[in-house]
Amino acid sequence: MIAMVRMRLGGFVRTARAVPPLVAGLVALVVLHGGAGAEAAEAYGVSAVVLFPILAWQTKLLLDTEPDTQRRLVAVAAGRRSEFVGGLLAAGVVGVALIPLALAVPWLVGGVTAPVRAGELGVGLAIGLWAHLLALPAAVGLGALASRAAVTSPLYGVVILVCGVVGVFVFGLRDSVVPWLVPPVLAVARASAAGPTGAEIALLTGHALLWSAVAIAGYAGLRRRRA
């Protein structure tokens, strides 16, 4: 499994496909937070929203790096389950690698105000880490659904990716009647800005994990249909 993850990460880096999402993430964070001067928790909640489509796009690029023939050969040699899990783990690893960057950049460009009360910084960092860790599995699930391993046409992949991101901003609004259709990225950002309660943390975490599980299950089903 480790060798499989390393192989996918190596191909992703060597082909320079890792560069566009990294640059896009840096530019988005700098533009978003440049001189904004928000509290840490609020700034990080918004960062998670902005990084969600970038993480999903990054996942699609990583899974698309491996040619279909090579992917099938790996599945035969190592087993379909190992090949499936290895791709998702690799996508998770590169996503996790962006989180420290997302936590550091707002400070570097003056997007976060200095803490006033003792412990405020620690709470803000904890909330920010929570927001990004909830966005990551949902983004991986969406990117996987849009990958070449799941769909028969690159156009379908782009449509899935765009519709998924747009859906987050349409159905994730406060007054939406079907918020469960999309991962709670906007809801987490709102809770981060206001200071989430224990009940909100539990509810939003459960929602994000359940949505991610459904998306990954859908990815597995689409892969089986293409096999």
Image (cartoon, rainbow, N blue to C red):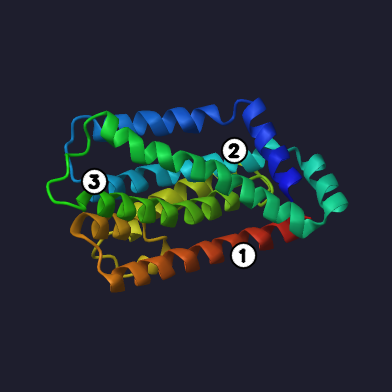
Amino acid on which disc 1 is placed: Ala
> What's the amino acid at mark 3?
Ala
Residue at the far front: name it: 118
The numbered mark at residue 217 is 1
Q: Tell me the quadrant of the picture where the C terminus can be found.
A: bottom right
Q: Which mark is residue 186?
A: none
In front of the other: label 1 or label 3? 3
User: What residue is shown at x 12% (from left), y 46% (from top)?
Assistant: 116
Residue on which disc 3 sits: 40
Residue 178 visible, this orientation = no
Please state the horizontal and vertical placement of residue 1, each as a whole percent of the image: 74, 51
Q: Residue furthest bottom?
A: 199
Q: Nearer the viewer, residue 200 or 51?
A: 200
| CA distance for labels 2 and 1 | 20 Å
Q: Is residue 18 left or right of residue 23?
A: right
Q: CA distance from mark 2 to mark 3?
A: 31 Å
- Callout 1 touching callout 3 (CB < 8 Å): no
Residue 105, horizontal then vertical, whole percent: 33, 33
Distance CA(mark 1)–CA(mark 3)? 34 Å
Tell me the element at label 3.
helix
Residue count near mark 2 (Cα–Cα under 10 Å), binned few <14, some 14–19, many ≥20:
many
The answer to which of marks 2 and 1 sits earlier in the sequence is: 2
Q: Secondary structure at mark 2?
A: helix
Looking at the image, tell me whether mark 1 or mark 3 is earlier in sequence order: 3
Q: Which residue is mark 2?
A: 61
Q: Position of residue 67 (x, y in %)?
A: 75, 37
From this viewpoint, is residue 191 visible? Answer: yes
